[in-house]
Image: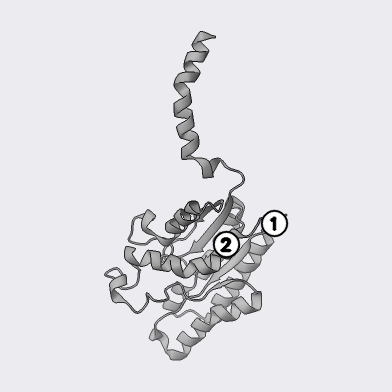
Amino acid sequence: MKFIDRFLRRAAPGLAALLLALPAAASDAARTVLVFGDSLSAAYGLATPQGWVSLLGERIARERLGWRVVNASISGETTAGGLRRLPGDLERHRPSLVVIALGANDGLRGQPVAAARANLEEMIRLARAARAEPVLVGLMIPPNYGIDYAREFRELFPQLARKARVPLVPFLLDGIADKRDLFLPDQLHPSAAAQPLILDNVWPTLEPLLRRSPRK
């Protein structure tokens, strides 16, 4: 008994530190936000903690909202690739919110807008079928393929959000896209300085959903 007492006294501080270090992972009560995007959400060219998705997790923790954030974004991802991946990530992470931030690579490659719309619409359906609430993130592209194509691409997101009745982040890079100093040297990917601004664009749409009580 004395040996057990000594062991518990010595082990207790380490066990306490371990429990404090892993509250989100150990808590079944924490709901999950799944961010499902491309390089704009994958912290391309940056340290992972600098990305807006990591900053989102930090803000949620500071405000004690009781959510964990999973970033399933992959650089270079298209809506077609995302559609193939989504069922597995929904099964793996069982999110309550799914932030769909895909389409930029479709636009930059000049792929048909109708195909991107169909893929995004199916992702919304899959998220709802998995009892998760989808959130759509609006994107824009430069007029490399013509003004008409750029306009059709830009209008895809608000049109789909209205049709599917999903919350919309109007434009992920609002206030950033026209500022060269907020991009990496490739002029395609936002810099570390841009990441808090991206989060500020996403937060007004997400915050009401994060503060809402869980479904009974």
Question: Residue 88: percent from the left, percent from the top?
Answer: 58, 55
Q: Is residue 109 visible?
A: no
Question: Residue 31: percent from the left, percent from the top?
Answer: 59, 52
Q: Residue at x 45, y 72 (%)?
A: 172
Q: Earlier in the sequence, mark 2 or mark 1?
A: 2
Does residue 190 appear to the left or right of 92 in the view shown? Answer: left
Circle 2 packing at 10 Å, graded few (<14), some (14-19), many (20+), is many
Instruction: Say if 6 sits above or below 137 in the image.
Output: above
Q: Which mark is residue 170?
A: none
Q: Which residue type does callout 2 highlight? A: Val
- Judging by the rendered image, the residue that carries numbered circle 1 is 215
Question: Residue 207: percent from the left, percent from the top?
Answer: 55, 63
Instruction: Say if 47 sits above or below 201 in the image.
Output: above
Q: Nearer the viewer, mark 2 or mark 1?
A: 1
Q: Is residue 22 visible?
A: yes
- Judging by the rendered image, the residue that carries numbered circle 2 is 98
Q: Residue at x 49, y 73 (%)?
A: 103
Q: Which residue type does callout 1 highlight? A: Arg
- Mark 2 secondary-structure assignment: strand
Question: Residue 111: percent from the left, percent from the top?
Answer: 48, 79
The image quadrant where one finds the N terminus is: top right
| Residue at the front extreme of this rendering | 63
For this rendering, which residue is in front, 94 or 17?
17
Residue 40, by quadrant, is bottom left
- Mark 1 secondary-structure assignment: loop
